[in-house]
Image (tube, coloured by chain):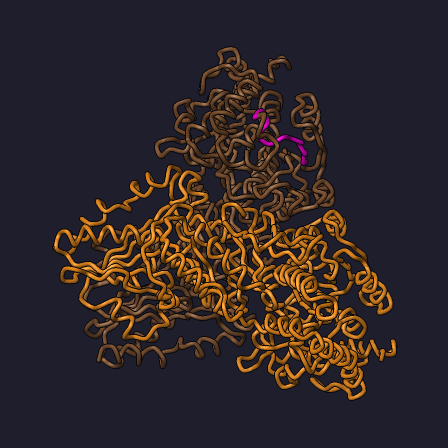
Chain colours: A orange, B brown
Amino acid sequence: MSIDPSRLGPMANAIRALSMDAVQAANSGHPGMPMGMADVATVLFSQFLKFDPAQPRWSDRDRFVLSAGHGSMLIYSLLHLTGYASPSLEDIRKFRQIDSVCAGHPENFLIDGVECTTGPLGQGFAMAVGMALAERHLNATFGDDLVDHRTWVVAGDGCLMEGLNHEAVGLAGTLKLGRLNVLWDDNKITIDGDTSLSTTEDVLGRYAASGWHTTSCDGHDFADVARALAEAAADPRPSLVACRTVIGKGAPNKQGGHNVHGSPLGADEIAAAREYLGWSAAPFEIPADILADWRSLGAKGAEARAAWEARAAAAGDKGRELARRMAGELPADTGFAAYAAEIAASQPKVATRKSSEMALEALTVGVPEMVGGSADLTGSNNTKTKATGPLTAADYAGRYVYYGIREFGMAAAMNGMALHGGVIPYGGTFLVFADYARNAIRMSALQRARVIYVLTHDSIGLGEDGPTHQPVEHVMSLRMIPGLNVFRPADAIETAEAWELALQAKDRPSALILTRQNLPAVRADTAMKSARGAYRLKAAEAARQVVLLATGSEVELALKVAQDLEGKGIGADVVSMPSWELFDAQDAAYRADILPAGTLKVSIEAGVTLGWQKYVGDGITVGLDRFGASAPAEVLFEHFGFSVEKIVPRITARLG
Amino acid sequence: MSIDPSRLGPMANAIRALSMDAVQAANSGHPGMPMGMADVATVLFSQFLKFDPAQPRWSDRDRFVLSAGHGSMLIYSLLHLTGYASPSLEDIRKFRQIDSVCAGHPENFLIDGVECTTGPLGQGFAMAVGMALAERHLNATFGDDLVDHRTWVVAGDGCLMEGLNHEAVGLAGTLKLGRLNVLWDDNKITIDGDTSLSTTEDVLGRYAASGWHTTSCDGHDFADVARALAEAAADPRPSLVACRTVIGKGAPNKQGGHNVHGSPLGADEIAAAREYLGWSAAPFEIPADILADWRSLGAKGAEARAAWEARAAAAGDKGRELARRMAGELPADTGFAAYAAEIAASQPKVATRKSSEMALEALTVGVPEMVGGSADLTGSNNTKTKATGPLTAADYAGRYVYYGIREFGMAAAMNGMALHGGVIPYGGTFLVFADYARNAIRMSALQRARVIYVLTHDSIGLGEDGPTHQPVEHVMSLRMIPGLNVFRPADAIETAEAWELALQAKDRPSALILTRQNLPAVRADTAMKSARGAYRLKAAEAARQVVLLATGSEVELALKVAQDLEGKGIGADVVSMPSWELFDAQDAAYRADILPAGTLKVSIEAGVTLGWQKYVGDGITVGLDRFGASAPAEVLFEHFGFSVEKIVPRITARLG
């Protein structure tokens, strides 16, 4: 059924009323965007968006991404009005309070209808690119009957001005993601004032230069909005619709100015707005006829969902396989066990970036939902396998994305892919350039998205490229991000274990920190010891006085230091510590056994020492608290004190 | 004098020969770019660039930025060939070795003629925008006689594909920086292969959409390059010149392919290249006539420099003021002392973002070279003062830049401004979005650039905007960056001290971490105690058992905790610790006095605890090791355990 056009105005005003009332009640929030985009959103939800409020996780729903997340009352209003179970009116009344799911910015882990957490500007848009990419990939794999939906985005000037936008636009244009439709809230206002203060860009020209379809509409003319959205939906290219709007539309004295962006309207202006809009209902009250109009919208989606379910059931194994992938469940056998056994036997001396590739060769066969890629460092990150052919505009069934020189865009797209579901994205860059993507890595963790970062060239061990390319603070800085599993494996076995653990961690991202240079095997068993985060790799022979803690490439050095100490009659454990997060999750007894009291603890890691005091107490930290230098790796390790000759005297001096 | 056009070919081949020989000797490096851009660079240096090899720091020189820093042999060759004192031929022979200034990527702190450190893609370009901006600002301040130069950039596909480029292009276009001319090495190759793998962008179209002048040339046709560069120099807009080149030009079997990008050519191909180029000189040998041609180029610049010096001398005070600013020396009185005295007397209870503004009102009067700005959060970062009028295309004499929603672009531009000299840039964003700019902050530190970051809304204390906007790991992560001074002041006095210390730190960047919420004054003296990094704010009254360490907004809480403990007869020091870096630089006796042995150390900071173990040992860390939530600030502090009621029992339990 379709809505009588004369009803759209009152429906849009319901969004405005809820938004201004909720912001006022919270005495905090952003009324400008929801009020400005209310008309556009009403057209989108009433005539274009495929959704079933009763089944918010239905896999073939359209994705709606509010990239301008500060306008959270827009999506809360829409979800409530259309009849999603959450948020309730009570939640909206408690907007921005600690016991409400209606947080200041929409959070995917609080409300099912929120596809991704937005607020950090530009990222919603870039995640939507990932969602649209996942859709096309699954469509190519499972067919139109099972996967056939769109991704709709509401974005503001901030989302478009961020550098990340250039990466997202370029990626979407190159991959010809025609199912991606972006509605730009073109209100010519940013926080500092008129957009002309800081930009003179011809936005549509820029998008056209990247192969996008572009059009404009009057964002307060329902018919014109519908015309533009239909045009966008019909065009085979990704679309940008410039919706010319008035920020805070409906607040008669404040609309159109930057002060309506991020502050409550105030009681007087709200009263004036009610008058202006002809809205006489009490705060948080939606007239029954208007609510009925909104609630009627889900019927079409419910019908489509029921038809889809019938098709999915009829599709048999194919339907079940899609359901498995969308549920995020791994295949019974990822391929890890057989590969680990092989590696334990062969004990290759290879760089961990290389053993990562070897593990991937097995896992990408066993786990068909893995979709890899690299930010233009494929041959250095070793991320491409035989099983993962190029995913291109000509072949969406491929499983390897050439992300280009777009670290942030890659990370955000991977977040979108993981949140869309049905794929497990992994992508590579140099560890030092994880900086470029850092907030998206944080957002992986906040959103509980299974994204796997392959971060190679992990220390001064990369050698000649010098300090711009040598991570020093990066491993520790990544450990600071709550909810991110950081692995720095010491050899091929630990690398394989890290991959398996990353895949198994359904609700969190992982970062694999890998070397450029070759490392010898330090283990020959397949006991999945990395699951403990840290474990005793070598027990002291003489009476234990020292416990050496090391990660990655420095485990080999720790073994040599221990050997030297044992030669002097000093017993020394070597603990390999690939993941601090997993170690911290062990019980106290295990941790105490690994880090026994009364021993001298010594950490060895080719990065900043700050942080290691957590485990070594007043012991010794061997690390690098300065930028590196340009020289061959072995020269640098020696130069910066990573040698038996330099470390052992520091230990014996302390032992006295 | 001008070079005979027939000489340009051999001159360019000298670059090719040095580049391929140096990479081969190092057995590591990037020959593709220097060989591909040798012809363009030869035209630039012989006909356009204003430089005097004898005076590499001459303030009115043109700036040459090799944004594609991996092609470092291009700039090393150019500097050596034109007769700069550094690098020597010996340095080039030892390319990428630990005792050579010819590092893998060009580093500004090793060689005077290297204007900035490049390698992290996109940043050289964005720093050049800052240099061009500084030039126009100083030109508007000191006139054409004293400041009148250009910024020339060589950039590759990577620099253009990075998101940062969008920000840099937008900023330069809006500010109409016509003295900025970018030479794009349009070779259609990236590391992964042909650029079409990852981009289909009409690059010139994008630049035109941002108000740039664009043109193209055949990068191997000297006359055509000269025509394009002349056109770029003449146009009042910033210019992009697409130089169509063949990567690795001159290596007959490898040129044009992606394998020539980042590996030595090998002895056979080098032999073939010598044949192909007609280059018969031995490795690292430059025929005398060709070297003479190169060495002749500096004469014009030397003449211009001498004329400039005469004008500068004639300009009297104006010349001396420019010299002071370019030398990076502060005025005798920054305005700090008077302001600090005033604040010590008035003891305002304001947010530190507000007291930062108050300090800035004084300092921007006292220090006219300060140029402020914000990434579209002027009213939130409180970065604008009365003395700093808008710096716009219409008024380059202004001192406040509306950077737009471009955190990374702002940070990189500020690096360029600081490295250009003559200005001290400061700029604001929310602390959480320092992530977006993180690698540029790192580059501030690596390059030893006096850039001051104003990072507000520094914890859950920002309240309702929720976890996307609440920094948790950020303060500690910034402390990880070597060479960055991080300040988290506790009140208006400490904030003023942080500003003064940041200004005084001539060769390093600072980050000021500031609250959204009000804080009471904790001090009434002007003793510049922050210079010690940490100091005893309150001494124990009862016998000292506890030392409370806190920063910023948690110092107030630490004082309350101490008061409660004293009420229980437990003596407790309170140490305010605004800067770890400065504290670590104190002598051992001072540090031992502040952190006396035999006491229970307790840290209180509303962020991750990892790292505090450095000071508290096996004491207590009060912090937040998870993401925050959306609610009013006071609710959140209570909810997450930042209260006397929650902290004191943890301390008394430990004391037994």
Which quarter of the image is occupied by the C terminus of chain A? bottom left
Residue range of the region highlighted in magenta in the rendering: B240-251
The image shows residue A165, relative to residue B246, as above or below, that is: below
Q: Is residue B532 visible?
A: no
Magenta highlight on residue B245: yes
Rendered image quadrant of residue A26: bottom right
Give the farthest residue toward the top. Answer: B289
Q: Quadrant of the N terminus of chain A?
A: bottom right
Q: Position of residue A364 (x, y in %)?
A: 54, 59
Vertical order, B111 against B625 (above or below): above
Taking B502 as reference, is B155 left or right? Answer: right
Where, by quadrant of the figure, is residue A478 drawn?
bottom left
In the rendered structure, the answer to whether residue A422 lies left or right of residue A145 reads left
Residue located at (84% from left, 69% from top): A222
Q: Where does the image place residue A563, in percent across and percent down from the top left?
A: 20, 52
Front one among B430 and B19: B19
In reply to whether residue B306 is colored magenta, the answer given is no
Residue farthest bottom in this picture: A288
- For the point 72% across and 61% down, the residue is A180
| Horizontal side of residue B628 vs A19, given as left or right | left
Q: Position of residue B611 (x, y in %)?
A: 35, 62
Q: Where B300 sits versus B386, above or below?
A: above
Residue B572 quadrant: bottom left
Front-most of residues B391 and B161: B161
x, y percent for residue A395? 69, 54
Question: Which is more toward the observer, B408 or B314?
Answer: B408
Judge whether residue A172 can be spotted in this image.
Answer: yes
Number of labels in the image equals 0
